[in-house]
Image: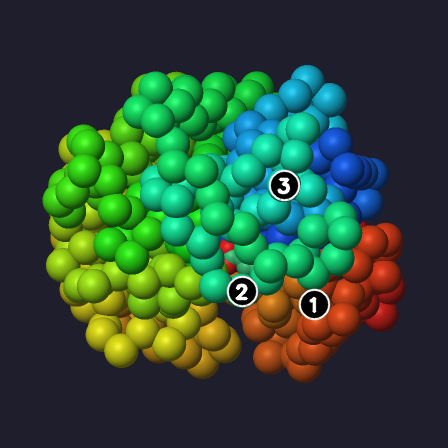
Amino acid sequence: MSQLFTPVRIGRLSLPNRLVMAPMTRSRNSDDGVPSELAITYYTQRAGAGLIITECAYVSPMGKGYVRTPGIATDAQMAAWKQVTDAVHAKGGRIFMQLWHTGRISHPSLLPEGALPVAPSAIKPAGQGWTPVGLQDFVTPRALAVDEIAKIVADFRSATRRALEAGFDGVELHAASGYLPEQFLSSGTNQRQDEYGGSLAGRARFILDVLQAMVAEAGGDRVGIKISPEMNFNDIVDANPQETFTYLVEQLRGLNLAYLHVALFGAKLDYHALLRPRFDGAYLIGGGLDQKSAEAALADGRADAMVFGGAFLANPDLPERFRQGAPLNVPDQNTFYSPGAQGYIDYPFLSGTNAA
Ligand code: PHB
């Protein structure tokens, strides 16, 4: 018996199926972080998902880390997102917005007045990032002062309010993939000796402060968090990830969050077995799934819903394809981040058209 097509409650929402569209950067927005008309089509085409989680939106201009990524910091950005949420809701869908601050994974060419990226500590990430002037080495970020940290926490709160005003059903904190929240959490990127570092409790404080601010605005039942233990993306390293993520998840209890989204890419430890029993809300699994492994995880009770990235990107009608056992379109990596409609809204539906 398929579990993917049974309903499930996530916070305030009742999902008609357990297929969640993963947050994915698509870089089709204006240089000012405003989604275009294409985004309305892209998300509406995928409204058959139990839940859509949008590409990540920056909470302030200093939180931008990639070209043509969207924000939720200005009225123009909000107004454009409102068109997206209205269209998705009109199609019967549900949509959360993912929120981020990329911290040191940015570049002066992406930031206001060519500012240096900010981070918990002035530690340069290995590697390069895509900027308006092409692929560039990351730079040594500037360490945040405590009053600046409070300002960023407040930015997450305003962004949550703006997302709700723009019609989103909830918000997800991007605490995965080596961006600012995980830079605070991880021992390799946080060498602070104040209340935002020093101990595990200190390193976790930023994420918990941000979540508290988001919950104060939206209620816990409209807030989720994404983590990716041991992904080691963006040069993030932690000396003891098992201890770190156990502690973090145990601290989430009082917040009554809608869900915990755990994406595993190459982790050696079974974090799902470790973390799920420590969390009371819905548990979402992402990372390299197919229909068979998704059904197996649901059948074993390892998760409440399953998160698909590339498969949703290339198959707007993914739930219908799974239901029918139909073949899947293959995602084209060359158009993941390229501007324009190609590889964005032209993946065919089963019917052979690309109408929503
Ligand atoms: C991620 O959050 O894992 C992520 C974000 C932006 C990218 C790629 C990956 O361009």
Measured Cα–Cα span from mark 1 to mark 3 = 33 Å
Residue toward you, 126 or 47: 126
Quarter where residue 244 is shown: bottom left
Residue found 41% across the figure and 78% down from its top: 293
> In the rendered view, does 182 fall on the left or right side of 275?
right
Residue beneath disc 3: 108
| Type of amino acid under label 2 | Gly
Measured Cα–Cα span from mark 1 to mark 2 = 28 Å
Residue toward you, 64 or 275: 64
Q: Position of residue 108 (x, y in %)?
A: 63, 41
Quarter where residue 21 is shown: bottom right
113 shown above or below 11: above
Do the numbered discs 1 and 2 sit on residues whose CB atoms are within 8 Å? no
Residue 58 appearing in the image: no
Q: Which of marks 1 and 3 is nearer the N terminus?
A: 3
Residue beneath disc 2: 127
Q: Position of residue 168 (x, y in %)?
A: 55, 31
| Type of amino acid under label 3 | Pro
| Type of amino acid under label 1 | Ala
Q: Position of residue 216 (x, y in %)?
A: 33, 20
Instruction: Confirm or reject: label 3 Cβ below 8 Å from ligand 1.
Output: no
Residue 289 appearing in the image: yes
Q: Position of residue 318 (x, y in %)?
A: 63, 65
Quarter where residue 305 is shown: bottom left
Residue found 63% across the figure and 53% down from its top: 25
Ligand 1 shown in quarter: bottom right
Q: Residues within 10 Å of mark 1 (few under 14, many from 20)?
A: many
Quadrant of the image for the N terminus?
Answer: bottom left
Residue beneath disc 1: 314
Q: Is mark 2 on a helix, strand or loop?
A: loop
> In the rendered view, does 306 fall on the left or right side of 110?
left
Q: Is mark 1 on a helix, strand or loop?
A: helix
